[in-house]
Image (cartoon, helix red, strand yellow):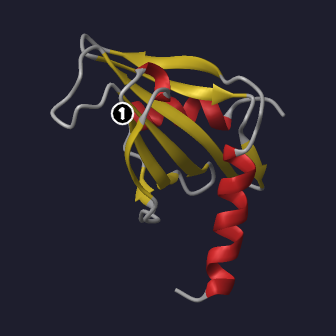
Amino acid sequence: MPLRRLYPLTALLLALVASPAKAEWKQYAAGESYSWHYELPFIKREGPTRTFWIVKNLSAIDEHERMSYRFLVQLNCKSRKYRYLTVRGFDGAMGEGKLLGFDDKLGPWVEISPQTLKAHLEDHICRMPE
């Protein structure tokens, strides 16, 4: 990938990661062994696109010795698609503690199916006032 294409993604990741403020997490789904949360107020808006963090918090350590995962997500409210920009696994709850692994490979755009957790999240994020 040419460096000129990497620079905007790197700048975006630095801007979203380098914030000194404490995260405020809003839960949008939960089950017996997990809960899903999105971060406020750190949603970046560019036209129909929203970029934000979500956390999958587990009730017990998984097979990879992780207690939670943080995902930087890009959501297109017009096309109803999303993709992951980065995924990080932690030994602590709510995306805190020791970083145990990460994947910064840009994911493909995926269509959001109706009646899914992603559709529920899209409903929260895309209808959020400015």
Q: 99 or 4: nearer the eye?
A: 99
Q: Position of residue 17 (x, y in %)?
A: 67, 45
Q: 11 or 33: nearer the eye?
A: 11
Q: Is residue 97 above or below residue 7?
A: above
Q: Is residue 51 above or below residue 21?
A: below
The quarter of the picture where the C terminus appears is top right
Please indicate, yes or no, whether residue 33 appears anywhere in the rendered image: yes
Q: 7 or 128: nearer the eye?
A: 7
Q: Is residue 83 above or below residue 17?
A: below
* Residue at 29% from the left image edge and 14% from the top image edge: 59
Q: 56 or 113: nearer the eye?
A: 56
Q: Position of residue 53 (x, y in %)?
A: 57, 38
User: How many numbered callouts?
Assistant: 1
Q: What is the three-letter code of the residue carrying label 1?
A: Thr
**Residue placed furthest toward the front:** 98
Q: Which residue is mark 1?
A: 116
Q: Quadrant of residue 110?
A: bottom left
Q: Is residue 8 left or right of residue 88?
A: right
Q: Is residue 51 above or below residue 123?
A: below
* Residue at 52% from the left image edge and 34% from the top image edge: 54
